[in-house]
Amino acid sequence: MQITLKLYAALTPFLPAGAHNNQLDVEVSQGMTVGGLLDAYGVPRRLCHLVMHNGFHIPPDKRDARVLSDGDAVAAWPPIAGG
């Protein structure tokens, strides 16, 4: 099934080749979870401060339970610092 993976800021380097505008459609197997998707692309969980699944925030303790469906989108951002 196909999922849109979106990674922003310091997470962008974890996107596979061919990504455009911080996103790429990727093929994943049935039963893949949000946490499993991030792991599959080597995205360090400790750097995933905000993770959204189809526009809804998924807290860290729910990421391994949230199962993806064909056409879903997962977006992740690292912690943001500024002044």
Image (cartoon, rainbow, N blue to C red):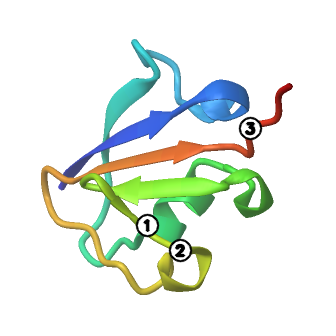
**Location of residue 83 by image quarter:** top right
> Callout 3 environment at 10 Å: few (<14), some (14 to 19), or many (20+)?
few
Residue 82 — which label? none
2 vs 1, front mark: 2
**Residue at the spot of label 3:** 80
Q: Nearer the viewer, residue 46 or 33?
A: 46
Q: Quadrant of residue 8?
A: top right
Image check: 60 left or right of 82?
A: left
Helix, strand or loop at label 2? It is loop
Of the residues under marks 2 and 3, which one precedes in the sequence?
Answer: 2
Query: What amino acid is at disc 1?
Result: Val
Q: Which residue is mark 1?
A: 34
Q: Amino acid at mark 3?
A: Ile
Residue contact at pointers 3 and 1, CB within 8 angstroms: no
In the rendered structure, which disc, 3 or 1, sits on the residue that comes first in sequence?
1
Quickly name the residue at label 2: 59
Q: Position of residue 76 (x, y in %)?
A: 53, 46
In the foreground, 77 or 16? 77
User: What type is the residue that disc 2 sits on?
Assistant: Pro
Instruction: Pick whichever, 79 or 69, lies toward us.
Output: 79
